[in-house]
Amino acid sequence: MEHKEIISLAKDYLNKPYSEDYISDISKTPKKFFASIVNLNEHQIRKVLTKKPEYSNVISDGWHSLNYACLTNNPEIVSLFIEKSIANGLTHLPKTTKSKKGIPNNLTLLHFCSAFDLDKSYAKILTCLTNLEEQEFNITLRYGLFFNNSKVPLFVKPIIGEDIYQKEMLDFYVSHWKNENGSIKPRSHDIFIKNFKGNIDKFKDFEIDVCFKLDGRKNYFTSTLEMFINYQYEIEEMGFDKFKKTINYFLSNGYSLNEKDGEDKTPRSYLERFIKNVNDFSFENALTKFIPEIEKKSLSNELKNENTLKTKKIKI
């Protein structure tokens, strides 16, 4: 191929996404347009909306145009869709009308952004609202945690303040819900198994203070150990190293095995139940060797806590 032909081929390739044929092709149906939207830039999207302005305010497969716009996580594109959709009759922010990809029906646009980790889209939507005081920021946090996405929760954190953030995170982690089969399990169980995969570092990703406690509730340590019991087989399948890392993580944060939570339960009571039901021989063998180390760290934390209490009682 000659030099000029190569250059011409390269230019055609670069210009193809902006050609009338390409724009006409992706404009044939809303579904086809929205299937391509995350790969389009603002210029391409403007050309589509010029040809098909109704695409700015339409429901396609249970999601509104703005849901698809938010998936780009591009504030300029989100702003463009808001402007166009209002011009085409939008009067309020849409909610999902169908459950798909794990996203429930009737989900608000802000919570949708949290579930998909769309921090820039989330921020852009906020700038367009006049009723910020009515927004359920606490629910936004929970969707981020449940879907293992931390950007939006960390964006919301300074809005609601540190104490409320930590309270909401712990409350969600230890709360119970009914599964589809009617069984009741802590939310943390699904989160830990499906998303955390035994990776305790996720607490750091969300800037969760694992020492934060609520009256009358489990703490992070006892709730996690309860999860170990309810998902005994899965935990053993994850391997002893992840189990060990989890226990050491809580002990390194000052917990002891005998410290009672808000429900008057100790980590030791849950750990003993878990140990009693271990089936994997290699896991059991490693656990037996690990117990003295756990006891030593737990005792050290108990002594530190006692000394701290004594120091606080000293009158000067």
Image (tube, grey):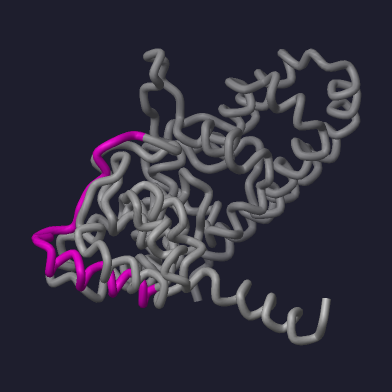
State the quadrant of the N terminus: bottom right
Task: Provide the residue span drawn in magenta.
Answer: 75-99
Q: Name the spot of residue 55 as percent of width and height, x first.
A: 25, 58
Q: As displayed, is residue 248 above or below residue 307?
A: above
Q: Which residue is drawn at 57% across and 32% down?
A: 266
Foreground residue, 204 or 139?
A: 139
Image quarter for residue 227? Answer: top right
Q: Which residue is drawn at 12% across and 69% down?
A: 87
Judged left or right of residue 163, residue 229 is right
**Residue 59 visible in image:** yes
Judged left or right of residue 16, residue 218 is left
Foreground residue, 267 or 48?
A: 48
Image quarter for residue 239? Answer: top right
**Residue 302 visible in image:** no
Q: Which residue is drawn at 52% across and 64% down?
A: 312
Q: As displayed, is residue 31 above or below residue 159?
A: above
Q: Name the spot of residue 113 as percent of width and height, x first.
A: 38, 57
Image quarter for residue 80? Answer: bottom left
